Each structure stands twice: as C-alpha cells, then as structure tokens.
Image: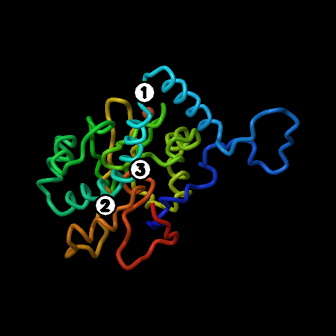
Amino acid sequence: MTNKKSDAAPPSSLKPDLHHQDEPGHEHSHDHDHSHLDETAIRVRSLQSLLVAKGYIDPAALNEIIDTYETQVGPRNGAQVVAKAWSDPKYLAWLKQDASAAINSLGFSGRQGEHMVVVENTPDVHNIVVCTLCSCYPWPVLGLPPSWYKSAPYRSRVVEDPVSVLKEFGVTLPNHKSISVWDSTAEVRYLVIPERPIGTEHFTQEQLQDLVTRDSMIGTGLALVPGNPPLNPVSV
Ligand code: FE
C-alpha cells in the first residue's frame, strides 16, 4: 500500500471542466464577455445578484458564512475527531453508534453536519465517500468540498471504478482489500476514519492530528506515515 498526499493536487483527469476561454487555440469569433470566471462562477454571481436585488439574501450575512467555512472550519476539525477515535476506544464506539452526537461533543456542528455517519477503514475494508447527485459534504468537519469532489468525472467514476480513481490519487490498496463507496445525501454525510499508521503507538492526539489529511477522511487518501514525508507536500 502506498500513500501520497494529494490534498491540493487533484488528478488531471478528475478536474472539472473549465470555461473554454482557457483552452489554447480556442477561436473567439463570437461576441461574449471575456470574464476570468468560469461558467459556474458566472451563473452563481448572476443568481446572487438577483437574490440580493430582490432582498431575499443579505450580502453581509453571505460573506460571513463563506468566511466561516473558508477560514474557521476545515479538515483540522475532522482530524481532531479521527485522532480522538484512534486514541480512545470508547469515543470510537460512540462515533459508530451516534456520530452526530460524538462529533458535536467536540464542538463541531452546524449546517451540512446534522446527520453524520462514520465509516472505519480496517485491514480488510477501505471506504470512499462521494455524492453522486451533487456535492453533499460534511462541512463542520471537513470545511468546503474540493473542486474535484464536485466534478462529474469523480462522481461517476468512483462508483464504477474506485480502484483506478484511487490510483490517480496515488493510493494503491492490497488486492485482498474490498472497497465500499458511500453515496452522501442531504440526509446523511459520511466521515472516513482512516487506518492509524503503524509506529504511532506513543503519539499524542496532537501529533496524530497532523497525520490526518482531508483526503484520508474522504477515502481518496490514506493517513500519513510518520517520518515518511508526502511526495507532494502541498498544504490543504
Ligand atoms: Fe449532494
């Protein structure tokens, strides 16, 4: 089994389609606004402008929500959950029985995290999370989803061929290991508890947290092995 930290480096084939203005050689004979935003961003901005103009949303409140999830909430929260689960068998049992309550006890709760389920990786089973319909994701413990998580290639291919998708993330599992793919919905959000790396028996929870990557909690990565620096050391 190999592991490569790939948190900020989505495999090229899983990258979402970008606006065609970025394609070299693309002929621009038609007349449109050459914005640097991609098509989705333009649509979102248009919708936001309309909702603000009609008084349905408050731009200040919207900015506060975005700031919260970009700067205050993120995968470090999930890493605390995993490190505690690795260190405390009673907490792990609680997580398996009632993940929402166990996660809430660490202060992580809120939108998109109301109905949590944890799935634990074992020597025989590897778990991967996807939302085949859209981009459901446990915000309170992982922050905002990476772009590849929302991309159509990831959402379809991870169901059909998880082995090759994992390979693109730098993860190769032993042949005997089975893979379970969990489809998030508006009702249930999943958090993967990766396998605890060997050689960490005497690690404190703080030290363990540093080994837990975002991708390892989605299932597209593994926890880092101490003393074995990631091949692609890009921060989340
Ligand atoms: Fe969704």
Q: Residue at x 21, y 43 (%)?
A: 99
Q: In terms of secondary structure, where does tag 1 sit? A: loop
> Percent x, y for residue 51?
49, 24
Q: Which residue is the site of mark 1?
A: 57
Q: Which residue is the site of mark 3?
A: 70
Q: Which residue is drawn at 25% across and 58% down?
A: 80
Residue depth check, mark 1 versus mark 3: number of the one nearer the observer: 1
> Circles 3 and 2: CB distance less than 8 Å?
no
Q: Nearer the viewer, residue 128 or 59?
A: 59
* First in residue order: circle 2 vs circle 1: 1
Ligand 1 within 8 Å, label 3 CB:
no
Distance, label 3 to label 2, CA atoms, is: 27 Å
Is 54 rendered above or below residue 217?
above
In the rendered structure, which amino acid carries the disc numbered 3? Glu
> Percent x, y for residue 179?
41, 48
Q: Which residue is the site of mark 2?
A: 195
Residue depth check, mark 3 versus mark 2: number of the one nearer the observer: 3
